[in-house]
Image (cartoon, rainbow, N blue to C red):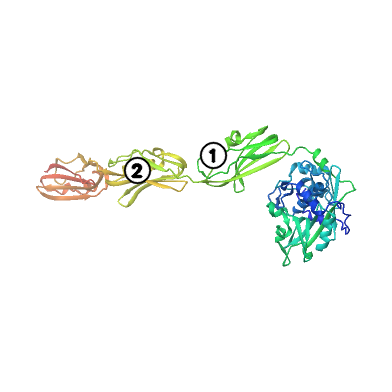
Amino acid sequence: MKKVIRSLSAFLLSLVMVMTPFANSYAANSLKTDVSTINSRISYEDYHQQTTRYNTSGQRVVGQCNICAATNLLNRKLALDGAYSSANRFKFEYVFYTSCLYCPGSNLTVDKVKQASRTYPYDDASNIITSDYTYSDGYCNNPIYQLGNKKYQLVSSNARTASELAQLIENHHEGIFIRCFYGSSGHCVVLYDYTLNSDGSYTFYSIDTASGSKEKWQTDFANTWLGGQSYNGKKVSPSNQECINKVMYLQAATGTAKMTQDDFFSNNAPVSSLAFSNVPAISNITQGNSYNLTGNIASNYTIKTFKGEIIKGSSTVQSASCSPNSTSVSIASTAVNTNLTFGSLAAGSYTLKYTATDSSGKTVTLSRSFSVVSASSSLKISIGNAPTTLTQGSSYNLTGTVSSNYSIKTFKGEIIKGGSVVQTASCSPNSTSVNIASTAVNANLKFGSLAAGSYTLKYTATDSSGKTVTASKSFTVQSAASTLSISMTSAPTSINKGSSFNLAGTVKSNYKITSVVGKIKQGNTAKQSVTINPNSTSVDIKSSNINMNLKFGSLAKGSYTLEITAKDSSGATKTYTKSFTVK
């Protein structure tokens, strides 16, 4: 059933209008004497019912001034009858639930209101009020309130003028109930005394528990909270008939109360005292740091379950629970403290929510907001082995580490010559520690392919905090000694005039061979010359243009020299010569 908090004004407006109050029962004493007697018997704490309360959903519930005023008036009547004590007084909770019982359409029973009070308990000093039961809009029917053998009933009066109100107070020394409009709302107080001034005006004295301080809540009406309000441009006052909405007084009841206060409490289970205590606010937590929970849970019942949740937005990101089966729990010693891992939380705003339930069925919650702030990144690159001087054509294995307290998202290696990147390789480790030797950077940077010259090896790493660091090492690639060679397997020694000859052999180098020149010379004069530019590390003479284009068959008789000269890209030069005769 819906939780509904109804302002008591509904039943106040509904009570049967009774114009003539019952006869003054206190003729033996003056009003002033009885007022003094009552005030000496009731403490400030007993009067000071809160008039602004909150339901279990944390929503503000207004209008409880009606219950406060009614409870105060009942206790003043008890005090006047000599029956009031701190152990024998009307309680706010009883007055509230009894009022609900008299509302048509509520379908409430005494058992149901007892269960409601066990589930959502409150008393004179509480700040939570709720009822689990729905009652329809309608009018409460003259509730009867009973404590021991004392039974009282609130009755409406048509008294509105200041003199009528004064007479009503004279007839009811405990005071009267009055509800006044202010602004667009209304507020209820008790009028308990008055003074007739020499100019014929009245000064009324009231109890207005909305006023807060003791000096304000029981004083002349003009100095109370309600006396400071206005209605239709005029000050709210008992002398301002326009603002008066409801006037009531107490009379002895002859009917049977639906529920006595003694019955309401005597057969009711003890109210659970389940509550959290000493749970501190949480300061900002640096990302990666742990946090130890402290605080206590206590109840007069066995605490059955305790749960802790870490909530981000509307989602629970962590949860831990335990079953204490004890009436007292130290949060620090529970599985909730052990299993909620604050160190694993990402930066952001969170709520820590506790929920505890005891064997009475009562559940309480407590929440603490906190933030996880980003830790400073410790990202660094430690260069292990990196080249200083390399011989051209040599490979190289890189070593070293990249580390961070955040996940390393990217790691890149570059080889730079001058201002230009000549090689690059990268990877996505997604780890807090990286061994450079095992990365694609080491596998894919090809030092052996570098030409001689000066270079820079540059590393760049970025982690999930957004931090980027670099590390560099300069190195040099030195030229290797050239292995340029010419090996001839077929060259002429003596040939007949007009005969051809096929040369055979190879030219090789560890550098690219840039040119090979074949000449037939007589003395210092080149009779024939052929040049090729192979741009490779090996040349087959037999299949080259040198063999094809040197024409031995065209030579005249005489002595000659075959000369083959090769050059490679390192600048090395080799020459092969062979003397031969044409007969």
> What crowding class fits label 1: few (fewer than 14 Cα within 10 Å), some (14-19), or many (20 or more)?
some
Instruction: Give the vertical position of 354 relative to 138 (above or below).
Output: above
Instruction: Assess whether mark 2 and mark 1 are in contact (beta carbons under 8 angstroms).
Output: no
8 is higher (above) or lower (below) than 394: below
Q: Residue tagged by mark 1?
A: 291
Task: Give how far across and how far down residue 396 sits, in percent.
Answer: 33, 39
Residue at image location 13% in from the left, 45% down from the top: 497
> Which label was assigned to residue 446?
2
Residue 215 located left or right of residue 463: right
| The image quarter in which residue 341 lies | top right
Q: Give the secondary structure at mark 2.
A: loop
Q: Which mark is residue 111?
A: none
Q: Residues within 10 Å of mark 2 (few under 14, many from 20)?
A: some
Name which quarter of the figure residue 427 lies in. top left
Q: What x and y, as percent, mark residue 63? A: 74, 54
Comparing 183 with 228, the one in front is 228
Expressed as whole percent of the image width and height from the top left, the position of residue 300 reads: 70, 35
* Relative to 416, 266 lies left or right: right
Judge whether residue 267 can be spotted in this image.
no
Q: Going by the picture, which residue comes out furthest to the right? A: 254
Instruction: For the C terminus, give its image quadrant.
Output: top left
Amino acid identity at mark 1? Tyr
